Amino acid sequence: AVSSETMTTIARSRVAVIGCGWWAQGWHLPHLAENAPHVVIAAIVDPSPLPISTLSSSPLLSLVELSKKYACPYYSSVEEMLADSAVGPTLDGAIVATSHASHFQVGMALLKEGIKRRSIAEAVEKKQQGGIDSDTAVAGKKRSRPQIFHRALHILMEKPMTCSVDEALVLRAR
């Protein structure tokens, strides 16, 4: 068991699971839960309130049941989750375990969120510098570029990445 003193010093990654079918319920969610207190299941997302699977004859839990079991909110879309100010901006990562056909759409939404976070961090940095580009010489000295801190959004996407090479290349280019 981990003491309460230790828990305050452990970094906790906030991860969303997108797609609540067999892979999510049989693998991702249980393994994330086993890694507490290092991982917090921050949200679950599935367009269907009653996920189904052809991979198992066992019934899957509904989104309401999963939400109770893993003590997290549930959403019917990635966009809805990202728009929730209590969840979207606080995510560290997302596991995409949806149908292959939706990987591109989900991946793009997550990548856009990551790009937005980076842009906000850069704008804050520029404002803090008084609008001066960090590479501009000040008083005869070239300033070094400071580190921009922002909450990155890591994405683990089940294979295949997309259903077409063109879509995969678009995701990679982001």
Image (cartoon, rainbow, N blue to C red):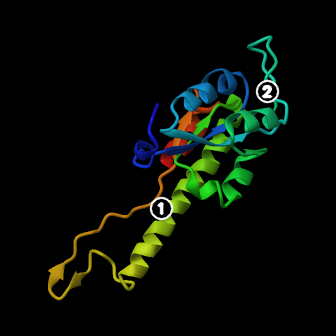
The residue that mark 1 highlights is 118
Query: Which residue lies at the image location 64% right of the left edge and 40% below the top edge?
Result: 104
Query: Eyeballing the image, is 75 above or below 35?
Result: below
- Using the image as rendered, state which of residue 7 and residue 109 is in the foreground: 7
Q: Quadrant of residue 85?
A: bottom right
User: What residue is drawn where x is 37% and y is 64%?
Assistant: 148
Q: Which residue is mark 2?
A: 61
Residue 60 in the image: state x and y as whole percent: 79, 22
Front residue of 26 and 94: 26
Horizontal side of residue 25 vs 150, given as left or right: right
Q: Residue at x 66, y 27 (%)?
A: 24
Image point 60% across, 27% down: which residue? 28
Q: Position of residue 61 (x, y in %)?
A: 79, 26
Nearest the camera: 70 or 120? 70
Relative horizontal placement of residue 161, taking residue 74 as reference (left or right): left
In this view, 103 is above or below 79 = above
Q: Is 138 located above or below residue 43 in the figure? A: below
> Closer to the camera, 174 or 83?
83
Pointer 2 or 1: first along the chain: 2
CB atoms of marks 2 and 1 within 8 Å: no
Q: Amino acid at mark 1?
A: Arg
Classify residue 57 by image quadrant.
Answer: top right
Helix, strand or loop status at disc 1: helix
Q: Amino acid at mark 2?
A: Leu
Residue at the outermost left position = 140
Image spot of residue 132 (x, y percent) = 34, 83
Q: Secondary structure at mark 2?
A: loop
Residue 107 place in picture, x, y as percent: 61, 43
Q: How many marks?
A: 2
Residue 73: assigned label:
none
Q: Is residue 118 above or below residue 61?
A: below
